[in-house]
Amino acid sequence: MKSDIKDKNLAPKGKLKIEWAGSQMKVLELIKRRFAIEKPLEGITLGACLHVTSETANLMTTLKAGGANLALCASNPLSTQDDVAASLIEDFGIPTFAIRGEDKDTYYKHLNTVMDFHPQITMDDGADLVTLLHTEKVSQLKDVIGSSEETTTGVIRLRAMLKDGTLKIPVMAVNDSPTKHMFDNRYGTGQSTIDGIIRATNVLLAGKKFVVVGYGWCGRGLAQRARGMGSLVIVTEVNPLKALEATMDGFDVMPIDQAVKIADIICTATGNKTVISVAHFQKMKNGAIVANTGHFNVEFDYEGLIKIAKNRRTLRDNLEEITLEDNKKIFVLGEGRLINLASAEGHPPDVMDMSFANQALAAEFLVKNKGKLKPGVYTVPKELDDMIAQLKLKSLGISIDTLTEEQKKYLASWHEGT
């Protein structure tokens, strides 16, 4: 079977990790059981560019149970779990192209390899496959049913393509589903980012001035968890409503120029580029720790920092000491890549359960609506999102109330007034 992984002998360890994650992903397991019976993806070739983790492996086995022919590559060179990649090949027969730490050329070679399978559906975490499809693989567009997108950054890219008139396929914005961004982005990112920072540094967070750059769902989750660890949390924002929300949530809000001067730890969560510039690095105090939990490694100018460095050395895995001309030391985590995946294991399976349930159902929705959807960015239908929430509650042993017929009538009518 065609593949490119580090070492197939790592498969036994990877299989155990996949099984453990699967035990926490109850919603996806229910979908997998139905898919195995109904085969909604029978004969469909699906190419995925996602973080190759134990949670993603459970999504892949769900899609395979539904009848899909799969090809998977990594959406981030530092997020790949090599043992999981090996197990996907050896135990589940899923073509996988992912090696932890792969260079840029290998990364793009893997993207192209997945596209060489001629997928009818693509599944993205950052819109790289869709971008490749619209630039170098244009001849394949006619055979593509659609795509789905996992991240905020990817959805922003896709909406930009739609605005420019260059998007030629329907794409399901999985990230826009409440059962995805309200939980994955907030609770998943919040916990896993703290986990990654601690694994990389082993520093005490209590009492540290912790700057969160950006107060979207990821920033919200990170700010909440940092405060829970005893940090003095500061938020920087460009959006007045989000800045106001952060203030009302009890966080200090200030411009980034001011925040970087006092930060002990600063973490970006914006989805934008160069929100921390070389000029910002020069204003930081000695010993500042800098990390990113946005999408791509462009949120702070790592390359610019290296250019002005007098010396650099790696102190621990994913912890680099950068010494500037004035002998000030800045500590950079994970080369500016997603620290929750570079240093830790990403989101817990419990929360990825809902995100990947959305991905599986989005693929089924695209197949069911083949030829009916115009090029555009679509959200997962509300009834599917509500179903995922209900299944998650059921898996947690939680039941909720339902409206009476009288209450439904009251909420749907204007006749009764007050």
Image (tube, rainbow, N blue to C red):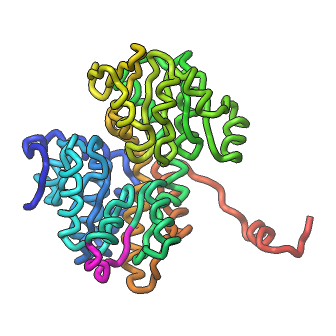
Does 146 lie within the magenta span? yes
Relative side of 131 to 208, left or right: left
Above or below for 307 versus 26: above
Q: Identify the residue at horizontal 42%, vertical 45% (top origin).
A: 350
Residue 131 x %, y %: 35, 65
Q: Residue 189, position in %: x, y?
A: 46, 41
Asked if residue 247 lies left or right of residue 393, the reply is: right
Q: Position of residue 246 (x, y in %)?
A: 67, 38
Marks counted in the figure total: 0
Give the residue displayed 27% in from the left and 49% down from the top: 52
| Quadrant of the rendered image containing residue 290 | top left
Q: Nearer the viewer, residue 37 or 180?
A: 180
Judge from the rendering whether residue 155 lies leftward or rightward of residue 196; answer left or right.
right
Quarter containing the C terminus? bottom right
Q: Which residues are magenta?
A: 137-147
Residue drawn at the location 81% of the way across and 69% of the way down? 410
Q: Residue furthest top?
A: 327
From the viewer's perspective, is residue 132 above or below residue 272?
below
Residue 384, visible in the rendered structure: no
Classify residue 375 by image quadrant: bottom left
Q: Nearer the viewer, residue 97 or 10?
A: 97
The quarter of the picture where the N terminus appears is bottom left
